[in-house]
Image (cartoon, helix red, strand yellow):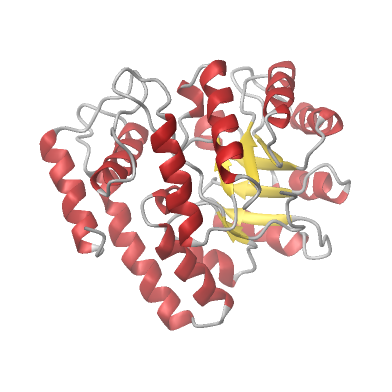
Amino acid sequence: MPLSAPLTGVVPPVCTPLTPDREVDVPSLRRLVDHLVTAGVDGLFVLGSTSEAAYLTDRQRGLVTETVVSHTAGRLPVLAGVIDMTTPRVLDHVASVTAAGADGIVVTAPFYTRTHPAEIARHFRLVAGRSPVPVIAYDIPSAVHTKLPAGLVLELAADGVLAGLKDSSGDLAGFREVVVGSRGLPGFGALTGSELTVDSALALGADGVVPGLANVDPDGYVRLYRRCRAGDWERARAEQERLCGLFRMTGAGDPARMGASSAALGAFKTALYLRGVIDCPATAEPQVPLSETETECVAKFLAGAGLM
């Protein structure tokens, strides 16, 4: 399904359900897609951070893309991450996901090596030049250790290199600069990756949202988006605050034995398991699974948000 121009709405970054032996759980992935589509989301994003793309083999990445594209069957556009360290590796992923039917690709700056802004710009131009589908930039400095400057994003957008931005930088002021600067670019969409400031981002002019917590409560984020678009800011704020409370489940994991990312992904998957959407809450190795006590904590947050 072709991407709208600009891309708008709620586009969840889809979790990757795994079996106990850490293979892709295809039946659970299909149920998760149905769970999201039924809630009324506007697109799906596979192979991003919430999908644990960094932990998946190329074979597993291919299976995820093929499964989601085939099961979605054109009902919604599917974006696929092509996240890797260097341009040649990214181009290999571009060929793979577009052959599988992805409607757009999501690209970070190169990482591992230190990269100059001019080289980052060259990276995006080379990828766009070889991609048969639109390119969305992914600003996630916590993972790639490079912040995409607003000026660079706007330059690439004006030149037709980028069709949008997924901003997971946590820099609301910088995101606002992109939103304001892109108002004269009707084909460019600015989307926030924050679960906690969706109402604020939409109020300042964002086109859409890509919240990982939408795996757990897609209906809540669809309600939030629609209330904001309708100008019903009081009810939107109430929904955002409920979702902020639910997001606290990501702190269930003990920081003495696991990282924040492991805790968040573990909480999302545990919540999906408790809601009956997926069969197993396993995260990819070497992430540490939630304990029984931590799982009970996630269940309490679900109950508090009216989801149990």
Along the line of sight, the residue nearer the viewer: 53 or 42: 42
Looking at the rendered structure, the number of numbered marks drawn on it comes to: 0
Q: Position of residue 142 (x, y in %)?
A: 50, 35
Q: Position of residue 20 (x, y in %)?
A: 28, 22
Question: With 213 as the anchor, is 61 left or right in this view?
Answer: right
Asked if one can make out residue 147 in the rendered structure from this viewpoint, the answer is no
Q: Residue shown at 57%/72% (left/top)?
A: 203
> Could you tell me which quadrant the C terminus lies in?
bottom left
Q: Position of residue 186 (x, y in %)?
A: 82, 62
Q: Is residue 213 above or below residue 23?
A: below
Q: Residue 68: which quarter of the image?
A: top right
Q: Residue 279: which quarter of the image?
A: top left
Q: Residue shown at 22%/37% (left/top)?
A: 253
Question: With 125 as the anchor, is 139 left or right in this view?
Answer: left
Q: Is residue 91 above or below residue 70?
A: above
Question: With 251 as the anchor, is 159 left or right in this view?
Answer: right
Q: Is residue 285 above or below residue 83?
A: above
Along the line of sight, the residue nearer the viewer: 155 or 191: 191
Q: Is residue 6 above or below residue 14?
A: below
Asked if one can make out residue 270 in the rendered structure from this viewpoint, the answer is yes
Q: Position of residue 84 (x, y in %)?
A: 62, 22
Q: Residue 286: which quarter of the image?
A: top left
Question: With 214 as the anchor, is 101 left or right in this view?
Answer: right
